[in-house]
Image (cartoon, coloured by chain):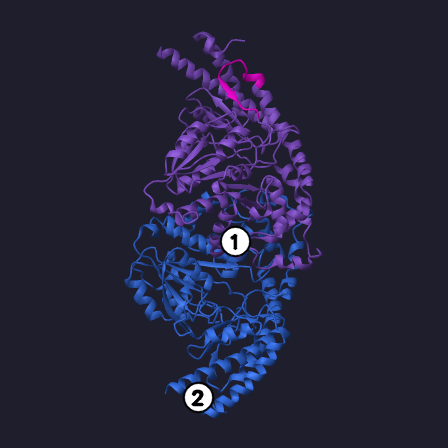
Chain colours: A blue, B purple
Amino acid sequence: MKTYQDMNHEELVSLHTQLLEQYNCMKALNLNLNMARGKPDFEQTELSLPILDVINSHYDFGDKIAYCNYGILDGIDEAKDFFAKMLDTNPQNMIIYGNSSLTIMFDQISRGYTHGYLGNTPWCKLPKVKFLCPVPGYDRHFAITEHFGIEMINIPLYEDGPDMDMIEEYVNHDESVKGIWCVPQYSNPTGTTYSDEVVKRFAQLKPAASDFRIFWDNAYIVHHLYDEHPQVLNILSECEKAGHPDLVFEFCSTSKVTLPGAGVAALATSLANKEDILKHMSVQCIGYDKINQLRHVEYFQKIESLDEHMKKQAALLRPKFETVLDIFEKELSGLNIGKWTKPRGGYFITFEAMDNCAKDIIQKCKEAGTLLTNAGATYPYGKDPRDATIRIAPSYPTLNELKKATKLFVLCVKLVSIEKLLVNKKMI
Amino acid sequence: MKTYQDMNHEELVSLHTQLLEQYNCMKALNLNLNMARGKPDFEQTELSLPILDVINSHYDFGDKIAYCNYGILDGIDEAKDFFAKMLDTNPQNMIIYGNSSLTIMFDQISRGYTHGYLGNTPWCKLPKVKFLCPVPGYDRHFAITEHFGIEMINIPLYEDGPDMDMIEEYVNHDESVKGIWCVPQYSNPTGTTYSDEVVKRFAQLKPAASDFRIFWDNAYIVHHLYDEHPQVLNILSECEKAGHPDLVFEFCSTSKVTLPGAGVAALATSLANKEDILKHMSVQCIGYDKINQLRHVEYFQKIESLDEHMKKQAALLRPKFETVLDIFEKELSGLNIGKWTKPRGGYFITFEAMDNCAKDIIQKCKEAGTLLTNAGATYPYGKDPRDATIRIAPSYPTLNELKKATKLFVLCVKLVSIEKLLVNKKMI
């Protein structure tokens, strides 16, 4: 098979004409598809509806009737046990919250900004605060740091995790660097899982700033697509071993386990950090929804039931990932106009187009009725320096919709790539 | 009946000996009672348990299946309708949140501090920010403003609301005054309901600061103890009529309607304020727990059912208030050693002791096994200038416990008052 680069002008023009015909046919179908949203579909949601049955007026509350009332700021013991098992840590290191881990992260940044961690200067009183952002990454992380006027620095993300040399250089020498955003397991959007070596280097950082923290968003810790899967090393115990117990805030939730809008979120950290957080939380809240915490614990009973549940989720998600990847493989391999990741879990596939093509591909898909995540969204300030990264979210459309959308997508990749090559050839 | 002031030294000493004997008898009972917590008791909680039954896996979701997923940042339409009816305002002015109105208030203050309202300078960039605090008031309000280093100014609370002359003087002339905490209906802890005249004067404030806001915590808007009850005037429509639609943030929740730990909280404000808030919220959250919002709407169906439900709550609470007030009346009236409020709703009674007696009374109760809210808690910085105000929370103990606790309380009031009078007489 010839790569597009090896084709001459005539071959490219002829192929373009042919592809454009196919594109116009698809456009005429008036599709209304969406591969932008990283959210569970209807079937996945349905899988978790029985969770709504476990706590009702006939439930034998006993002493747990106290969970209906105010109080218990750091969450019910049963939920601390459950999430500690999920994160392989100790219940006393856990705080259990409401339905959104994003809100916990926002609150943690907000506290750094208004009050500072463990007696450090609040960031709002400093001339400059910086965060490191492995890219491509999660747009909502970047939105939080941007909201607080924190300067974001791109860190390349490789197959085994972010560029640790660069991170060490920044963190260990620049006191204005106060944090880094990480999605260590099945990173959003590449699906990368950090290697043990990378996690260990994180734990061994010697930050110039005593209030530097790793924001370890373990959103996809149990979201495996295959029985055989990588598992990210436990950052909390590595940090403890390295003598830096306060270095990390770890976040997780059941948003993509049970019902995305009605899940439970949690944070794990050192006892010193936890005490500091609770001091602030006691002003902010009397206690989170403990009935929903209980609902989750009762639904899963044992951590093994969680594994079973996630296997059912995977059985619905896996065909979607494979559909996209099969079409990519069949339609694009050998053409040298794009690369893509092959995640073993999580919610996204990253497609890397030729430079300066991402925006145009996304626009072309949109014109034919298929939405993709905005170009640049996976970079701080919405600026992808190479305009090459496209986030594909296969979870929400039906399998049939997804096939159509992916076929349209590869058509747009081909068209835009040819157009760029033709312009480049003209310029030569 | 003689007042204590009219008694001579011998009479006081002899009465003291007699009361002390009674006190020591009560102390020997090793009581473990609590009149400190403004939270519903077990029976009140039980009343709302059927709310846990209305949304289950057999519920006919239809299009509402979307409520299980991410999104719908400002809450589901049905909940906006419900809370708008409760607050007598328009659904489009509502934002529906998670389980805690305290958290909404904290977030609003935090936003003022970090970002400012409607383009105004963030408070963290200003040399001085002040809040007005009608006293006695709610300790958790004061804790939030103190947390953000905001200077708090005491405003006397009268029978018809706070001192409006003083408020107008501050608000209309001091640009550093950015807000005021109000509990307009059955104020915590006095039970005061603001008169129409007071509400109108609030609406007609002409603040020196364009980011001055009234924090209108309507926590007890439907919490009437009697069918015949006062109802605070609608502040939002009064502000609109007065041409100051952006002047107020109004808060409420179902925490003391259904389950205190698993309720739904809401905010009502102008469309401009709402848009400003949602801009920030979109960074903080993908959406609150909409299933719990739906659970509440389905449970109450019509606003009339809410009234019925609150009447059942009142039937449990009313005897408790009356028990306390009856004992006060019987044991203390005519003695001139204390005054108390007689609320028509809400959760608290305020007892005003003789000056410099509150701390000692509370300590004496504690030594005999009965907890009361800390002295000073109802004032900013925990400082009651007269050391006279005691907050009584009759809701949590059983009726029997409450009787004992109140009898102990009046005994302590008598003892401490005599001790003060004796010291004063010696000093003369």
Estimate the spatial distance between the alpha carbons at disc 2 and disc 1, rounded to whole Å: 56 Å
Q: For the residue carrying disc 1, how many other residues have a C-alpha within 10 Å: few (<14), some (14-19), or many (20+)?
A: many
Q: Position of residue A71 (x, y in %)?
A: 53, 43
| Label 1: element kind | helix
Co-location on one chain, circles 2 and 1: yes
Left or right, residue B246 beside residue A246: right
Q: Relative to the observer, which residue lies in front, B132 or A14? A: A14
Q: Chain of mark 2?
A: A
Q: Position of residue A388 (x, y in %)?
A: 44, 75
| Label 2: element kind | helix
Q: Relative to the observer, which residue lies in front, B109 or B34? A: B109
Q: Residue furthest left?
A: A173
Q: Which amino acid type corresponds to the residue marked 1 in the rendered image? A: Lys
Residue in the picture at 34% in, 67% down = A167
Can you say whether A40 is above or below A111 in the image? below
Point out which mark residue A137 bears: none
Q: Chain of mark 1?
A: A
Please check the rendered image and state whether residue A29 is part of the magenta-colored stretch, yes or no: no
Task: Say whether residue B22 is visible.
Answer: yes
Which quadrant of the view contains residue A401? bottom right
Lower position in the chain sequence, tag 2 or tag 1 = 2
Instruction: Report the residue marked by disc 2.
Output: A5
Left or right, residue B360 beside residue A43: left
Residue in the picture at 60% in, 49% down = A291
Instruction: Report the residue marked by disc 1.
Output: A80
Span colored in magenta: B329-342
Q: Position of residue B164 (x, y in %)?
A: 46, 29
Q: Which amino acid type corresponds to the residue marked 2 in the rendered image? A: Gln
Please check the rendered image and state whether residue B335 is part of the magenta-colored stretch, yes or no: yes
